[in-house]
Image (tube, helix red, strand yellow):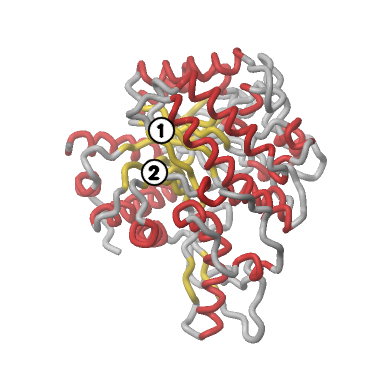
Amino acid sequence: MQKFVDNHQLASLLPKDFVFGAATASYQIEGATHEDGRGTSIWDTFAATPGKVFGGHTGDVADDHYHRMPQDVDLMSQLGLDAYRFSIAWPRILPQGRGDVNQSGLDFYDRLVDALLAKGITPFATLYHWDMPQTLEDAGGWTNRETAYAFADYAEIVARRLGDRVAGWITLNEPWCSAYLGYGIGVHAPGVRNRQAAIDSAHHLLLAHGLAVPRIRAAVAPDKQVGITLNVYPVYGEDERPETLRDMALQDAFSNRWFLDPLFQGHYPETFFADMGLNPPPIQGDDLATINVPVDFLGINLYSRNLVRGTAGQAPLADAVATVSPVPEACYTDMAWEIYPNALKDMLLRLHHDYNVKALYVTENGAAFSDKWDGKSEVVSDPRRVSFLQEYITAAAGAAHEGVPLKGYFVWSLMDNYEWAEGYRKRFGVVYVDYETQRRIPKESVLWYSSLIKDHHAAR
């Protein structure tokens, strides 16, 4: 892949209306978990369970964004962001998951959206970034079909309040993670370890999306866009042996097609459930038609790739395919994720060609590194993240140059935050957060990113 070291050239390769933004998630930054009527979420419960999260860390305070939101929006403005992708905490809006609406919760996001618009920053709202109300989990969570209907009700409530101003609506963030990490292997909330539950939960998550889309559209202004965000992992083979090709197909179905196929083709991968060694989910009536509702865009969260090593003999289960790790001579982030920028270009091209997606956004891309602040410098050095972002955005620009309808890129994340089961020990932010004082310190990467945005604006 050609590397465009000149940011002016990189900026000029992207469409004139391309959107540069940053992304966050409610539980990871807001804090104030017990304030203003917010209910308990599954992540509050999971984080409070000994042994589930590194260091016993919780999101009780996080980045204290709930109280510091105006200053954080000022920071976004200073950085020159075109857009900001945030998520809405379901338990702030409906503390019990359904029923009585907590107006204080809606008021907070109302103020956030108005603050963004006042600074010329376009709001993109994610309705579910993993913090389900605990009361719904007590009734089965995503294994319970009723949760899909509860989500659609919640989506409509939020859309009616913010739908005149929020430009982009994302129903779900990474439902693969909610289903498999949350219900299959239990490393994320709610911590269930039941692979069949993962299959059933995935179907109900997809159903929730399908039910919510028309209700959001009916509540928002006609020019607003509705979509979904998936985490995707391009699959490559270590060699071209038949068993490697077979296992690549299994891995691809598990990592990508499990959600892509029903969303964009109206069916699950043909042998997927048998390849998982599990039963199909409880599909009813027109579920797949509901899930296959047209969307205005697909958001993808992409960080790395899967490199498959074929296993001789009988095929493995689809979620037990052997992968190469570490990859010889490869570079890795602090999450032990291989840095492989071509994965982004390859996946964007595939989604364009195989699924005919109308519009694409990179809704998350970034890297965790061991950033250090000396307690006095005005800028935190993070040269590896600068290189990472330059290489991945160059890959995205290459896809756009080849005809992919790529509309925007959101760096993950605006600032260091609560990294789920890793607690606060992994730093993804382009802005450093000193958790003791809640001071925000720019990193070199955000200065580079801000410069790229300025170059792009100048090239319009």
In the image, what residue type sits under mark 2? Phe
Q: Which mark is residue 168?
A: 1
Residue 92 x %, y % = 63, 22
Q: Amino acid at mark 1?
A: Gly
Q: What is the quadrant of residue 167 in the picture?
A: top left
Left or right: 215 in relation to 116: right
**Image: 83 above or below 410:** above
Q: Residue at x 45, y 24 (%)?
A: 219
Left or right of residue 65, residue 391 in this image: left
In front of the other: 434 or 374: 434
Q: Residues within 10 Å of mark 1 (few under 14, many from 20)?
A: many
Asked whether the residues under the numbered discs 1 and 2 touch, taking CB atoms below 8 Å apart as contact, a structural biologist would say: yes
| Residue 389 to residue 268: above or below | above
User: Residue 289 or 417: which is nearer the viewer?
Assistant: 289
Sequence-first tag of 1 and 2: 1
On the image, the x and y values in percent for residue 76 come to: 40, 26
Point out the residue furthest to the front here. 285
Q: Which residue lies under the disc numbered 2?
A: 297
Q: Residue at x 60, y 13 (%)?
A: 103
Q: Which quarter shows the N terminus?
A: bottom left
Q: Secondary structure at mark 2?
A: strand
Q: Which of the 4 quarters of the picture holds residue 208? A: top right
Apparent side of residue 228 relative to residue 117 in the rendered image (left or right):
right
> How far across and how far down the image is residue 281, in percent?
67, 56
Quarter of the image with the C terminus in it: top left
Q: Nearer the viewer, residue 386 or 250?
A: 250
